Amino acid sequence: MTRLLGSVCLLYVLSVAANAQFLNTDQKDVEKIKNSTLLLVLEEPDPKIVSKLSKKYPKALEDYQNQIAGRNFALRYALENFWDLTEKVEFHPESTAFDLIEKNPDQYLLISFGQYLEYERIGLVSGSDGDPAGWRTSSTGELTYNHTSKYTVLSREITTLEISDTKPLVSVFLPSVYPSLSGAVYGVQQIQYLLRYLAADGENKMSKMPKQIEANNPKLKDKILLIDQNDVDPKVTAEELAEVYPYPVQLVDPSVIREAILARDASYAYLQIVSTPGERGSIDTHVIADASDGKIYYYVTPGLGVGSYSALITDYRTRIKERHFKSYAVD
């Protein structure tokens, strides 16, 4: 199947979207990251917030504490198990971490989640199953994650994973405002893929990333593409899908995607719908990455145009339609 015109259009849209979404990271930033100790500052509850909530909103206090514990757990897990670009990674609570950074500004860089919801809103949000969104503590005291958090309107909020000094050096957008284990791993793999791309050749630049993604795209047909069945428009039939996307693809329960990511299974690529900045709000961007190493095969905001923006809708995000499948892979 040859889609020359589609390939040209894909490159154009990739250029528009990717240039808007990736920071202007360069080789100097990569060297700085490689030569620094990466420091995860373990978030701690704010005593003032704890005092306020404990008096009037005990349930919100529990949610607030759970989100902090869960975010720390997810990012620490991802770094301990998936970060291999540098050897120096340390984990410190806020009470000591910022002293280290202040006293040794040339030694440390910070890795952290970026924007996320304030505790007041977290306390009001539920997953599609009606239980609290994000992280929670089970009856046995174990941290668990409510994976239906993805299927809420607030999943359209924007969250990042970034490495920074006084400013972000490299940053990627995450699939949910509530980072899960697989979501944190996705972020770590994306950052490492971008940094390795820059380090591979002195001529590589973030402005050339769209062409790099386009060069990767034909290899997608050799992977089994996993897509969350909840992300697909119910009107898309199996027969239609086979006609417009003739390569291996599976519409699966999201747990299958999580397992592929955590197992680094090179058989699979997977699609994430990620909230990214638009002119007047967040917009849905489709990202296809390799489950083994985060290689990007596709990065497009469908329908992106001048002045585009997202409207607040009751649906948790825009569903994948037949026309989207047509652009995912080219010969």
Image: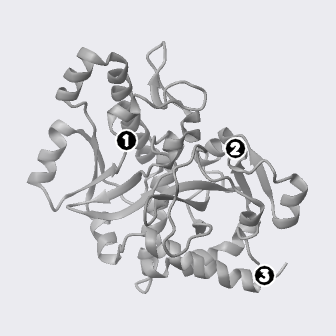
In this image, 212 relative to 325: left or right? left
Q: Which residue is mark 1?
A: 117
Q: Which residue is mark 2?
A: 230
Q: Residues within 10 Å of mark 1 (few under 14, many from 20)?
A: some
Residue 306 x, y percent position in the rendering = 51, 76
Residue at the extreme right of the image, as rendered = 239
In this image, 281 relative to 6: left or right? left
Instruction: Name which of mark 3 and mark 1 comes first in the sequence.
Output: 3
Residue at the extreme top of the image, as rendered = 139
| Amino acid tagged 1 | Leu
Residue 232 x, y percent position in the rendering = 72, 51
Residue 19 x, y percent position in the rendering = 46, 76
Callout 1 secondary element: loop
- Quarter that holds the C terminus: bottom right
Q: Residues within 10 Å of mark 3 (few under 14, many from 20)?
A: few
Residue 181 x, y percent position in the rendering = 50, 40
| Amino acid tagged 2 | Asn
Residue at 51% x, 45% y: name it.
Answer: 155
Foreground of the two, 311 or 219? 311
- C-alpha distance separating marks 3 and 1: 42 Å
User: In the rendering, which numbered label is found on residue 3?
Assistant: 3
In this picture, is 113 found above or below 282? above
